[in-house]
Image (spheres, helix red, strand yellow):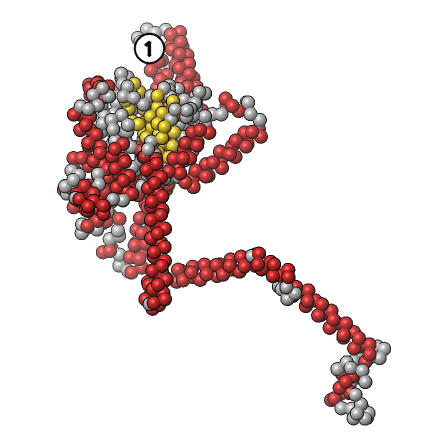
Amino acid sequence: MVEGGSALAASVERPAGDGASPGDRHEQQQAAQMIQRNYRGYRERRQLQGIGLDASARWAEAVRDAKWRNATRLKSRADSTPNRDSLATPEQRARANSAAARNNWKRVGEIARRAGADDAPDARSESDTADERSPEERINQRRKKVEQKSERDKTAKMMDLPYFLEMVDQKHRYGSNLRAYHEHWKKASTNENFFYWLDKGEGRTFEHPTVSRERLEKEQVRYLSREERLNYMVRIDEEGRLCWAKNGERINTTTEYKDSVNGIVPVDDDTPAYGPNGQLLHDGQSRNFRHSRSSSITSSSSSSSAEHSDVEGEHYVNEDLDKAKGIKKIKHVSAATILNHLLRSSVKPNSWIFVADTSFRLYIGIKQSGAFQHSSFLHGARISAAGLVRIKDGQLRRLSPLSGHYRPPTKNFRAFVHSMQDNGVDMSRVSISRSYAVLVGLEAYVQTRRKVKKSVGAVKDAETKVVHPEVYEKKVEEQKDNSKSAQRERQLLANQAEKKEAEQKEKSWGRRIWRKISRNGERDKPANREKEQAKEQAKEQRRSKVLSKSGQEVESGIPPGGKGDGLSKSAPQPAAASGVPA
């Protein structure tokens, strides 16, 4: 019997009655083995196509999820801090505090790794093109992919910081709703962490005036597992059309489709569907949802559609701007408020979203605000691009770079468009949303504002340095980190800067020209020293020839103690000593 199919084989081997013959049981056993072989072949083909996971990948995903749940589980401060009553000595308390701090940092590190992680590469097969390419072409193609991946890693975008609460929350309650309660928690006099305070601590009875508890618990974003994610993966066919990787059907972003446990399926499909709030619908509820979804496009002005759009638009409300009146509204206009206005205007029934991971694998789904967002595809991990999409019969018709969860810069969107072109996507009828031009203008405005602010600050610092030097020095000292490690780091950086400046000065054109035209330049000094040493040696040799006899040194002609040897005082002793002939 084949391993892994014992249950199936046992069910097939079980005879219908006690009188089953041995021949019938043998035929049933052969049938079970054939079913197992066919299923294994089907499973292997899906894995090679990148739309299935093997056992090792499932185990790795399970271990990773277990670590994540352990890192984000609710803990009170009493459970995470040591009991001081049981610790007698200061050394024991110090060790306990150190262990608690390490555990806290370990949890933070696990969360940071999850947020900055990339989806593992799939097991897609290249057997269809492997035989057509030479080994050199395959090596070049592989090297090119590695280089492109490294470039994308540099510009990959993590989820926007305010939405980290949504990712860390084990229920994945909608980020904007959690932020409202988080602002109140920061002002509350409590030592508990936010999620423990919200669910089990003092804040469990708190009701926010703008976000009710019912809405907080109702709007939970559905995060896909690695296997569920494959149902939303997109492939490109030979004509450059976008197709579902799971079945090869061309994509149409119309109301004739719904989101189900098997990904995007036709509305009349019997697969259990997900409702507007992300809940799984039963058969009767699914039929009602199917009818309401198919009729929403023909009656888009109906009260139900308008109400649904208003509820979704509440996630991007600018409260300060809406409360202000008259000319006071100008104070609250910023890049963030303009972006929220764009996101609010983009919330419409039948909105389809896309996400491209760091390997530019494309995922597409139906947006359900507060239930299925851009963060759903990759479980809050890094992305290369995200936005809205419209497709007809697999042909890309419209792209928009708007994403409230990630807010990627326009350069990521441009890189995504170039990647689609390089992969042969039919871009003949695609149009870019005007929101792209607005985002380009916002980025230019923000960069200009930062530069102006930095320049104004530099001018003010220069003025303070001249007019009030003591105030400037005090300000600089206050901004410094006075720890020993910071002082050593500043000294090291200063030494490195001096060394780098000296090297640049030596390599400058002015220095090179000076060394060439100057006799006393740095390059000429060693040669001049060698010439002077050679001249001195030549003088010493001539002096030895004049004053010394054959086989006798100069010093041997001088009496001990410096006294004369009976010659006249007028004898030219000093002149001979100085090398001048008598």
Quarter of the figure with residue 57: top left
Q: Is residue 416 above or below residue 509?
A: above
Q: In the image, is residue 482 above or below residue 545?
A: above
Q: What amino acid does circle 1 point to?
A: Pro
SS type, badge 1? loop
Q: 529 left or right of 302?
A: right
Residue for badge 1: 15
- Tell me the residue at 77%/85% (across/down): 575
User: Which residue is rendered at x = 21% and y = 49% of the image?
Assistant: 186
Q: Nearer the viewer, residue 372 or 226?
A: 372
Give coordinates of residue 104: x percent, y percent.
31, 48
> Left or right: 126 with respect to 227?
right
In this picture, residue 544 sits left or right of residue 369: right
In the rendering, at what x and y percent does residue 20 appear? Answer: 34, 7
The residue located at (29%, 43%) in the rendering is: 335
Question: In the image, residue 294 lies at what x, y percent?
Answer: 24, 19
> Callout 1: few (<14), some (14-19), or many (20+) C-alpha neighbours within 10 Å?
some
Q: Which of the image's four quarters has the N terminus?
A: top left
